[in-house]
Image (tube, rainbow, N blue to C red):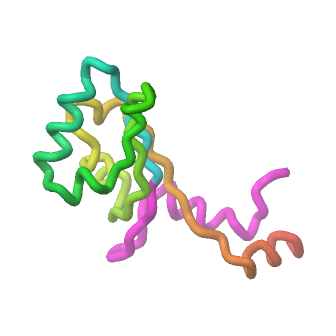
Amino acid sequence: MGVPRTAAPAMNLAARGGEKGRSMQFLIESPHTKQECLTALDQTLKQGPDALARFEWGCMSGDHTAYAFVEAEDEAAARRMVPEVVRGKARLRPVTRITPQQIESFHKA
């Protein structure tokens, strides 16, 4: 099933960046190696305890990836939340909540 046409404008907005003064939501996946792990943790902690708490870490189960849903002005601002040592490997995806009303409109499209 394709993306409903009524959803396209919101997705295009996310791809371009948020409107001036409006935040966007991003899913961050920040993979790192076992060797990079402690450096990534240290760099995140240096940003402050709130930065460390923003991420969920799979490292203790052997999945060396940090995961977070964050709010940021644009993708560049969200990427700066990722530890510098692994920033280039991070995957960021704009995400949005979908309302029941939107689902109803998708069916009508």
Q: State the image coordinates of residue 80 (x, y, percent, origin top left).
A: 25, 48
- The residue that appears at 45% across and 62% down in the rendered structure is 25
The residue nearer to you, when weighing 75 against 67, is 67
The residue nearer to you, when weighing 34 against 16, is 34
Determine whether, in the image, residue 43 is placed left or right of residue 100.
left
Q: Is residue 92 above or below residue 109?
A: above
Name the quadrant of the C terminus: bottom right
Picture quadrant of residue 35: top left
Magenta-span inclusion, residue 6: yes
Determine whether, in the image, residue 11 is placed left or right of residue 36.
right
Residue with the most extreme bottom position: 101
- The residue that appears at 85% across and 51% down in the rendered structure is 1
The magenta stretch spans which residues? 1-26
Q: State the image coordinates of residue 14 (x, y, percent, origin top left).
A: 51, 60
Determine whether, in the image, residue 63 is placed left or right of residue 101.
left
- The residue that appears at 37% across and 52% down in the rendered structure is 75
Q: State the image coordinates of residue 67 (x, y, percent, origin top left).
A: 42, 45
Residue with the most extreme top position: 35
